[in-house]
């Protein structure tokens, strides 16, 4: 009886392995053809760019993106850059396109992420204090952006840069706002809503405060982030790598993604 069960298990495992191998082989075969018909018109057959599209094979920032991030770009497109959505291709064919791009980039899978995600998790909620402002899978603060899927569209270097230089290319909506009341009391935070007459400010403790502008002495919009600008000094390079690795791991497992690490 034990031998029969053992044989059955082996057969099942072999069948699963063959199925996975067949799917992988299918993607390898479909990738070049789909890329040639859908992507090469703009990006060239070699992916190194053409008259209508940029180099996507040699650009380091694209090489550093995860497969999941590239999958999301192909699926959603980039309207601002004139790239259409290829949602109609379906999951398997989009995955085949990503794998073909990896081949053109010189490697079959996304580059390994630096750092240790478990150490990064401890740093995120501990020494670095990221969780005081940022939400991750429904837990943490709400002053900063939700980072649950943030790393799915950012390279490791882009995430590192955002940590060490938060004021670089800062969205005006994230500028620090300092409000001074007529009695001299000041409040510092981020403007969540503002018009000609009123201001809704979220302060650093996460609380919301509504102001009527005629009751204020001044409102100052400062081109700096509330995020600490000294992480490059407070954390070692290895610790920052750990945090980056943790964010990547969380993004890959985020519930809004497909089981095979793809964005909706």
Image (cartoon, rainbow, N blue to C red):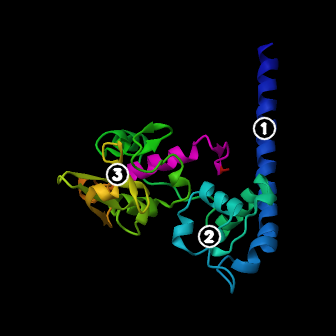
**Element type at mark 3:** strand
**Residue assigned mark 1:** 16
Give x and y (percent) for residue 108: 64, 61
Magenta range: 241-262
Q: Residues within 10 Å of mark 1 (few under 14, many from 20)?
A: few
Is residue 181 visible in the rendered image? The answer is yes
* Cβ atoms under marks 2 and 3 closer than 8 Å: no
Q: Residues within 10 Å of mark 3 (few under 14, many from 20)?
A: some
Residue lying farthest to the front in this orientation: 214
Is residue 99 visible in the rendered image? The answer is no
**Element type at mark 2:** helix
**Residue assigned mark 2:** 105
Give x and y (percent) for residue 143: 39, 47
Which residue sits at x=62%, y=57%?
Answer: 67
The numbered disc on residue 258 is none
Q: Is residue 185 magenta?
A: no
Give x and y (percent) for residue 168: 37, 68
In this rendering, is residue 255 above or below 102? above
1 vs 2, front mark: 2
Which residue sits at x=33%, y=50%?
Answer: 239
In the image: residue 20, left or right of residue 106: right
**Element type at mark 1:** helix
Q: Is residue 259 magenta?
A: yes
Front residue (pair 233, 24): 233
The numbered disc on residue 211 is 3
From mark 2 to mark 3, how far is it between C-alphas?
53 Å
In the image: residue 116, left or right of residue 3: left
Instruction: Locate the N terminus by quadrant.
Output: top right
Q: Give residue 84's quadrant in the image.
A: bottom right
In this rendering, is residue 193 above or below 40? above
Front residue (pair 167, 1): 167
């Amino acid at each position: 009886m034990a031998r029969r069960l053992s044989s059955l298990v082996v057969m099942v495992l072999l069948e699963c392995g063959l199925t996975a191998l067949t799917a992988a082989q299918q993607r390898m075969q479909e990738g070049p053809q789909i890329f040639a018909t859908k992507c090469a018109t703009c990006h060239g057959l070699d992916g190194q760019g053409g008259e209508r599209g940029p180099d996507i094979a040699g650009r380091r920032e694209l090489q550093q993106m995860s497969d999941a991030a590239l999958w999301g770009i192909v699926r959603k497109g980039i309207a601002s850059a004139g790239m259409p959505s290829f949602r109609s291709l379906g999951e398997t064919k989009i995955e085949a396109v990503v794998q073909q791009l990896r081949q053109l980039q010189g490697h079959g899978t996304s580059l390994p992420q630096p750092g240790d995600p478990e150490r990064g998790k401890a740093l995120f909620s501990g020494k670095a204090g990221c969780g005081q402002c940022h939400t991750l899978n429904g837990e943490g603060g709400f002053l900063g952006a939700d980072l649950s899927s943030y790393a799915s569209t950012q390279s490791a270097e882009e995430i590192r840069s955002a940590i060490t230089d938060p004021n670089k290319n800062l969205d005006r909506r994230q500028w620090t706002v300092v409000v001074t009341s007529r009695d001299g009391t000041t409040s510092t935070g981020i403007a969540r809503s503002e018009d000609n007459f009123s201001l809704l400010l979220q302060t650093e403790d996460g609380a919301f405060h509504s102001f009527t502008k005629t009751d204020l002495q001044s409102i100052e919009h400062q081109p700096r982030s509330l995020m600490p600008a000294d992480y490059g000094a407070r954390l070692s390079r290895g610790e920052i790598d750990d945090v980056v690795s943790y964010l990547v791991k969380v993004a890959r497992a985020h519930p809004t993604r497909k089981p095979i690490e793809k964005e909706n």
